[in-house]
């Protein structure tokens, strides 16, 4: 017993079936092409973002002790591959360097004027103070705060960047002084040279 197909299926010729198949295949390829284009756009966008991230400036704020001393410095350095333009630096609090009233870091030129350009690897160093002064009982939050924030605003091409870094000096309390073995040996040689020069001077007299 045969199956009775609807009239419109019975009347379709081989050409009609081929046309329908071609339409379906074309639709599938159009869909697949659209998916590939979207995937390629996502890849290109990701690569562009990665390239921008690799080449943009990075203004890094950190604290660095001076080797062989109890001095602490505030470091602002461009660790990126391109220059930071229109750099604006600001402190969240007044900070008096070495506790001296006339040395308010927040009012210094770097923090009160726009820096036109900070090239790659360029670094700004600001003396904050020494251990006894910063962590002594006479220091207060109004003089040289141990916790403050530095905000850096700058341009990377047409992109505006604003970053705020928390600076915390408290972990440096009761830490040992860093020593450079090479510098120590050079200092010993210098002292020996001074002694030898004095001995030769006395002998010539």
Image (cartoon, helix red, strand yellow):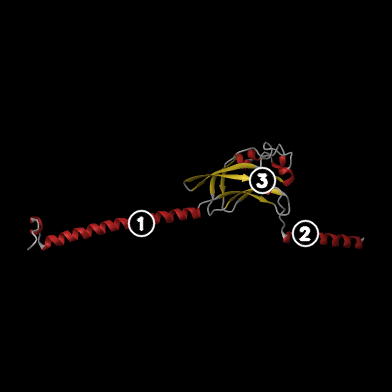
Q: Is residue 188 above or below residue 129?
A: below
Q: Which mark is residue 39?
A: 1
**Residues at marks 1 and 2 touching, judged by CB atoms closer than 8 Å:** no
Q: x, y percentage for residue 107?
A: 64, 38
Choose the circle earlier in sequence order: 3 or 2: 3
Residue at 56% x, 47% y is 117
Label 3: how many Cα within 10 Å (few below 14, some 14–19, many 20+): few
In what element is the residue under mark 1?
Answer: helix
**Numbered badge on residue 170:** 3
- Image vertical order of residue 152 relative to residue 192, above or below: above
Observer-side mark, 1 or 2, equals: 1
| Figure quadrant of residue 68 | bottom right
**Quarter of the figure with residue 121:** bottom right
Identify the residue at image location x=23%, y=57%. Answer: 27
Closer to us: 1 or 161: 1
Q: Are marks 3 and 2 in contact (CB under 8 Å)?
A: no
Query: Marks 3/1: CA distance?
Result: 49 Å
Identify the residue at the far front of this view: 1
Give x and y (percent) for residue 146.
Answer: 66, 42
Tell me the SS state at disc 3: helix
Q: Position of residue 15 (x, y in %)?
A: 12, 62
Quarter of the image that includes the C terminus: bottom right
Q: How much space separates mark 3 and mark 2, taking CA atoms? A: 31 Å
Q: Is residue 11 left or right of residue 24?
A: left
Q: Which mark is residue 187?
A: 2
Q: Position of residue 145 (x, y in %)?
A: 66, 40
3 or 1: mark nearer the eye: 3
């Amino acid at each position: 017993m045969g199956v009775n197909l609807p009239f419109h299926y019975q009347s379709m010729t081989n050409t009609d079936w081929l046309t329908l198949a071609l339409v379906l295949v074309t639709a599938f390829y159009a869909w697949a092409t659209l998916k590939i284009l979207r995937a390629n756009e996502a890849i290109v966008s990701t690569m562009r973002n990665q390239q921008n991230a690799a080449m943009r400036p990075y203004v890094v704020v950190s604290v660095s002790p001076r080797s062989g001393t109890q001095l602490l410095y505030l470091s602002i350095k461009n660790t990126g591959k391109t220059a930071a333009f229109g750099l604006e630096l600001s402190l969240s609090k007044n900070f008096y360097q070495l506790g001296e009233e006339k040395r308010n870091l927040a009012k210094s030129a770097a923090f009160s004027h726009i820096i036109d350009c900070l090239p790659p690897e360029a670094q700004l160093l600001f003396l904050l103070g020494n251990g006894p002064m910063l962590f002594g009982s006479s220091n207060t939050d109004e003089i040289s705060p141990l916790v403050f924030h530095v905000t850096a605003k700058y341009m990377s091409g047409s992109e505006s960047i604003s970053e705020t870094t928390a600076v915390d000096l408290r972990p440096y309390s009761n830490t040992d002084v860093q020593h450079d073995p090479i510098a120590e040996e050079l200092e010993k040689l210098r002292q020996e040279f001074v002694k030898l020069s004095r001995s030769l001077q006395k002998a010539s007299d």
